[in-house]
Image (spheres, rainbow, N blue to C red):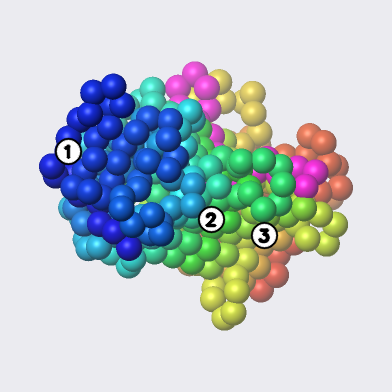
């Protein structure tokens, strides 16, 4: 296990090699040189401070591969400057980041035109775990989440997917984008989220939202904005053991207390799940979840729910409890806040917004052991 240090860098002309205190070498295009030192058996590196963490962002975004490597926090980090999200579409983070139970404070980034914003901007077949992020201000465009902005998939094979687990976002939370906005994850393709908490300080004015003007901001959730793109494959994606509290969550289309939208097909008898393991209960508490429309309202049927905004295919919601949750809309005729039965009455009001049944008219949402109810109001 080695420690990342940014001291004593030497530049070698011709090879453009920067060896940092004998621990980290950054050599463009070379996987073996990117994070190697004399101890070639070590694949785990400790990050102790903000500068060392920024070194990781610079190296990954510059094209260094982290596949097979683990980066672990050695202590709490208080960020003093605007953060550069780790990973881009051209250079995603594909290793393991272990927060080791420590806290990263004051995560800030603001660019209304920038996609893939978060502590990690863009990951591909990565593991992000065991980290707390306290006090967050993030503004981006598509794919904005405190832990990960966008989680991609390496291939269609079942072994390749990203995992986000044991992560907490707390304190004052301000997260916004235009599409795919969440407290933990903005957008995920073949993504597992487990044991994660978004807990804003009560009365802090914390909010997660999709900005909208002419077009509706969409896919917003307390945990994740969007999880999908696993159609016609065996199921990988799911959300297990999560809780959300003390937030305003809003957008123009597909807004949920836990998840905004999913289009995961799954397999027969094994649909996408927002569920639990053991005795854990998913909770959404003291949240105001509402539709805030753009100028083109009426072109879309909007979906809003205390747990789920909308799904494209059949799915399951299990072991969820909602308490002190308000759902707001402009016009009930244009909003699903529950599912309409054959009599035109709303059923399961508050848990989910509905099914975007463009392709699967037989799609259903199965609720099991779900308690509590939401209050509906007109915005």
Q: Which label sits on residue 9?
A: 1
Select label 1 or label 2 by which is in front.
1
**Closer to the N terminus: mark 1 or mark 2?**
1
What span is in magenta? 211-233
**Closer to the N terminus: mark 3 or mark 1?**
1
The alpha-carbon separation of the residues under discs 3 and 1 comes to: 48 Å
Q: Which label sits on residue 224?
A: none
Which residue is at a point 22% across and 48% down the rendered structure image?
A: 22
The alpha-carbon separation of the residues under discs 1 and 2 comes to: 34 Å
Kind of element beneath mark 3: strand
Kind of element beneath mark 1: strand
The answer, for residue 191, to whether it is visible in the render is yes
Select label 3 or label 2 by which is in front.
2
Secondary structure, magenta segment, majority class:
loop
Which residue is at a point 60% across and 70% down the rendered structure image?
A: 276
Q: Is 207 in front, or is 113?
A: 113
Which residue is at a point 66% across and 73% down the rendered structure image?
A: 369
CB of mark 3 within 8 Å of CB of mark 2? no
The alpha-carbon separation of the residues under discs 3 and 2 comes to: 15 Å
> Residue beneath label 2, please?
163
Mark 1 Cα shell of 10 Å, populated few (<14), some (14-19), many (≥20): some
> Residue beneath label 3, please?
273
């Amino acid at each position: 296990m080695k420690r990342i240090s940014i001291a004593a860098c030497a530049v070698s002309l011709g090879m453009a090699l920067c060896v940092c205190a004998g621990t980290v070498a950054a050599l463009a295009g070379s996987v073996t040189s990117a994070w190697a030192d004399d101890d070639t058996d070590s694949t785990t590196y400790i990050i102790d401070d903000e500068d060392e963490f920024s070194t990781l962002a610079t190296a990954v975004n510059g094209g260094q591969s982290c596949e097979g490597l683990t980066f672990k926090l050695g202590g709490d980090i208080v960020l003093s400057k605007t953060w550069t999200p780790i990973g881009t579409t051209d250079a995603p983070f594909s290793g393991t980041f272990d927060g080791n139970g420590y806290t990263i404070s004051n995560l800030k980034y603001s660019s209304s035109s920038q996609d893939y914003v978060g502590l990690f901007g863009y990951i591909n077949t990565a593991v992000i775990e065991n980290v707390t992020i306290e006090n967050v201000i993030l503004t981006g465009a598509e794919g904005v989440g405190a832990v990960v902005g966008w989680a991609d998939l390496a291939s269609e094979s079942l072994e390749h997917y990203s995992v986000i687990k044991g992560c907490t976002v707390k304190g004052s939370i301000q997260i916004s984008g235009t599409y795919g906005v969440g407290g933990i994850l903005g957008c995920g393709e073949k993504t597992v989220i487990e044991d994660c908490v978004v807990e804003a300080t009560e009365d802090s004015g914390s909010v997660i939202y999709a900005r909208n003007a002419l077009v509706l901001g969409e896919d917003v959730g307390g945990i994740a904005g969007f999880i999908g793109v696993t159609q016609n494959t065996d199921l990988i994606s799911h959300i297990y053991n999560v809780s959300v509290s003390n937030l305003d969550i809003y957008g123009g289309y597909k807004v949920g207390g836990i998840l905004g939208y999913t289009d995961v097909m799954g397999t027969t008898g094994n649909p996408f799940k927002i569920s639990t393991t053991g005795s854990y209960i998913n909770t959404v508490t003291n949240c105001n979840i509402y539709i805030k429309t753009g100028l083109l309202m009426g072109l879309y049927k909007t979906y809003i729910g205390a747990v789920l905004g909308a799904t494209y295919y059949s799915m399951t919601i299990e072991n969820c409890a909602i308490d002190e949750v308000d759902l707001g809309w402009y016009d009930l005729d244009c909003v699903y806040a529950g599912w309409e039965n054959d009599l035109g009455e709303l059923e399961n009001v508050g848990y989910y917004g509905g099914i975007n049944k463009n392709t699967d008219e037989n799609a259903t949402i199965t609720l099991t052991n779900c308690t509590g109810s939401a209050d509906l109001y007109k915005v």
